[in-house]
Image: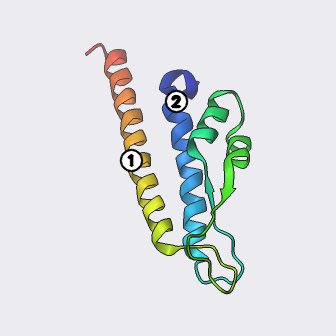
Amino acid sequence: MSDSLFGIHAAALELRSQRMGLLASNIANAATPGYKARDIDFAAALDARMGGASADDAVGGATRYRVPVMPSLDGNTVELQAEQVAFSENAVGYAATLSFIRGRAENLTRALKGE
């Protein structure tokens, strides 16, 4: 039902939430030797989700390992500044998507009340 009411925004919010968790995991493991940073190709995941894939399948198929600009000697591929930028961009996208959904819900509420 949420897909028909909120369209692409419901899927985008779900994917942005999962991406935020993945980016937070990267940041948390910035000092873990051998940790490989991952990210989600958001456009590919959203295309898969809108094509009928479940959120987990869409994210799984669009998850990629990051290629570091400056690899560390311990094998960790997390570049903290890049992860923080990606996290911030995703947070802004999450807030914008949530705003679209909130506006749609308010419009539907007003329509049901007859305002």
Residue drawn 54% across the image and 72% down it? 27
Quarter of the image holding residue 110?
A: top left
Q: Position of residue 52 (x, y in %)?
A: 70, 28
Q: Position of residue 31 (x, y in %)?
A: 60, 84
Report the side of 24 relative to 113 (left or right).
right
Label 1 crowd bin: few (<14), some (14–19), many (20+), radius 10 Å:
few
Image quarter of the N terminus? top right
Position of residue 59 relative to residue 38, above or below, is above
Report the side of 9 relative to 114 (left or right).
right
Q: Position of residue 4 (x, y in %)?
A: 55, 21
Q: Disc 2 residue type?
A: Ile
**Mark nearer the N terminus (2 vs 1):** 2
Residue drawn 67% across the image and 27% down it? 51
Of 29 and 81, which appears nearest the observer?
Answer: 81
**What kind of colouring is applied to the model shown?**
rainbow
Position of residue 52 relative to residue 61, above or below, is above
Q: Are marks 2 and 1 in contact (CB under 8 Å)?
A: no
Residue drawn 67% across the image and 41% down it? 55
Report the side of 16 relative to 77 (left or right).
left
Of 108 and 50, which appears nearest the observer?
Answer: 50
Instruction: Find the residue positioned furthest to the bottom.
Output: 73
Of 88 and 72, which appears nearest the observer?
Answer: 72
Quarter of the image holding residue 65?
A: bottom right
Of 3 and 41, which appears nearest the observer?
Answer: 41
Residue that badge 2 annotates: 8
Label 1: state its secondary structure.
helix
Label 2 crowd bin: few (<14), some (14–19), many (20+), radius 10 Å:
some
Image quarter of the C terminus? top left
Residue that badge 1 annotates: 95
Residue drawn 36% across the image and 24% down it? 109
